[in-house]
Amino acid sequence: QVQLVQSGAEVKKPGASVKVSCKASGYTFTSYGISWVRQAPGQGLEWMGWISAYNGNTNYAQKLQGRVTMTTDTSTSTAYMELRSLRSDDTAVYYCARDGGATIPYFDYWGQGTLVTVSS
Amino acid sequence: EIVMTQSPATLSVSPGERATLSCRASQSVSSNLAWYQQKPGQAPRLLIYGASTRATGIPARFSGSGSGTEFTLTISSLQSEDFAVYYCQQYNNWPPERTFGQGTKVEIK
């Protein structure tokens, strides 16, 4: 069965960076992309960007351009999301989701979420 | 950037009643529209894609309709497990860009 398993919760200070991982199993990793979505406490869902696991192409939300980098490691079927220059309003649960790009452009499987807390 | 607007923000419904949720896009997204359900402490779950196609395992009481800029999610007879927050999402195919609505909370009346 398809599973996306994310890394554990993180506490970071303002200005620091965080890197969240998302390990995929149960499907051919390079046949899909991964989108990252975050949700601040009590708020809605915000799409952060997408990466192709096939060739590493990315497309980031304009709001996060310059602060976010998404990568994949096909040898371990793992996607990564790094967010730099953290601020308090980056405190959120971060989700990865399987995203088929142009062919299956919606999120049919999700990771369990990773809470990132930014606090001095 | 395409803006998605959902209404109402909160919908109070009695079990067994019908719920109708709306989603409007700031410009046409054709049928590139999905709906998700999210319960507290859980990741969202895909309900509908292509505006009207139920995802695998989704009960028939969930239906989606619309195209262009106006979309509707209907829950024909609300069950206790359906009380949750519902999000619409547009997806253009290339380059991949996705936008969520702000959500509609369906609560027990």
Image (cartoon, rainbow, N blue to C red):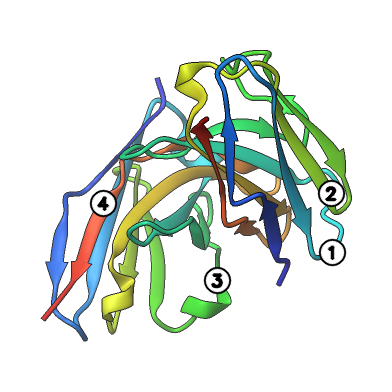
Badge 4 is on which residue? A114
- Residue pictured at 42% horizontal, 59% vertical: A43
Could you tell me how far apart the alpha carbons at marks 1 and 4 are, in whole angstroms? 33 Å
Q: Chain of mark 1?
A: B
Q: Is residue B4 left or right of residue B85?
A: right
**Residue nearest the viewer, comparing A106 with A57:** A106
Q: Residues within 10 Å of mark 1 (few under 14, many from 20)?
A: few
Secondary structure beneath dot 1 equals loop
Badge 3 is on which residue? A61
Q: Where is residue B48? Give x, y as percent.
A: 67, 31
Q: Where is residue A46? Give x, y as percent.
A: 49, 61
The total of numbered circles placed on residues is 4
Q: Chain of mark 2?
A: B
Same chain letter for marks 2 and 4: no
Q: Which of pointers 4 and 3 lies earlier in the amino acid sequence?
A: 3
Q: Chain of mark 4?
A: A
Q: Chain of mark 3?
A: A
Same chain letter for marks 1 and 2: yes
* Mark 1 touches mark 3? (CB < 8 Å): no
* Mark 1 touches mark 2? (CB < 8 Å): no
Secondary structure beneath dot 3 equals loop
Badge 1 is on which residue? B27
**Residue B14 can be seen, yes or no:** yes
Q: Quadrant of the C terminus of chain A?
A: bottom left
On residue B109, which mark appears? Answer: none
